[in-house]
Amino acid sequence: MASPRRKFALLAALALTVAGLGTSAAVYQVQARSATLRQTYSVWYPQGSHYYRYYYYLPYVTATSYNYHYCYYYPDSYPNYYYYYNPYTSNYWGRSPVKTGGKQLYSKLEKKDQRPKLEEIPESAFPEPSTPPPIPESKDNVTMLMPPGDLPAKN
């Protein structure tokens, strides 16, 4: 089975190819963003009672492959936030409000508060949402892209 990075690279290449044929405005938008794409989100995937999507990013402009984190949505237990999970450290590290009024908002946990299970993180550990942090592992202070406003469709 292809890794998420490989799947994304293949999808981006396909989008570029199809967009070059002039098929649809939606594919063209993917192509236009892909040409200079440093970070993006996948579609939502159902997993039991919650959903996840990949947050793909290039830690630096000349990187040749994407890293990724997971963006989780728990509509039954935590419906007001998207939660970010780092698979490299096996910890949740922050969250973004679902409803932002068009603002880019993020609450980054301090290292000491990051945990592998969301229920282990007290609500008080999350700071008030503010400006998103830089792209993970980056050194150029490019702000992390917040997720699109599309909630997953109920199964």
Image (spheres, rainbow, N blue to C red):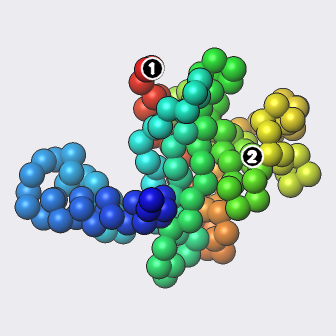
Mark 2 vs 1, N-terminal side? 2
- Furthest toward the front, the residue is 1
Q: Amino acid at mark 2?
A: Tyr
Label 1 sits on a secondary structure element that is: loop
Q: Quarter of the image holding residue 116?
A: top right
- Answer with left or right where residue 44 lies relative to residue 133: left
| Residue 28 as seen in the image, left or right of residue 89 | left
Dot 2: few (<14), some (14–19), or many (≥20) neighbours within 10 Å?
Answer: many
**Residue at 83 percent of width and 45 percent of height:** 115
User: Residue 23's mark?
Assistant: none
Q: Nearer the viewer, residue 4 or 138?
A: 4
Residue assigned mark 2:
92
Q: Amino acid at mark 1?
A: Lys
Horizontal and vertical percent position of residue 11: 32, 59
Asked whether the beta carbons under mark 2 and mark 1 sit within 8 Å of each other, the answer is no
Quadrant that contains the N terminus: bottom left
Taking the view exactly as shown, the residue that stands out farthest to the right is: 112
Q: Is residue 104 visible?
A: no
Does residue 101 appear in this view?
Answer: yes
Residue drawn at x 43%, y 20% is: 155
Frontmost residue, 117 versus 84: 117
Q: Nearer the viewer, residue 76 or 142?
A: 76
Position above or below: 47 against 79: below
Q: Quadrant of residue 89?
A: bottom right
Residue depicted at x 68% and y 24%? 78
Q: Position of residue 127 (x, y in %)?
A: 81, 39
Q: Which residue is mark 1?
A: 154
Q: Secondary structure at mark 2?
A: strand
For the point 86% across and 55% down, the residue is 111
Residue 119 at x, y percent in the picture: 82, 31
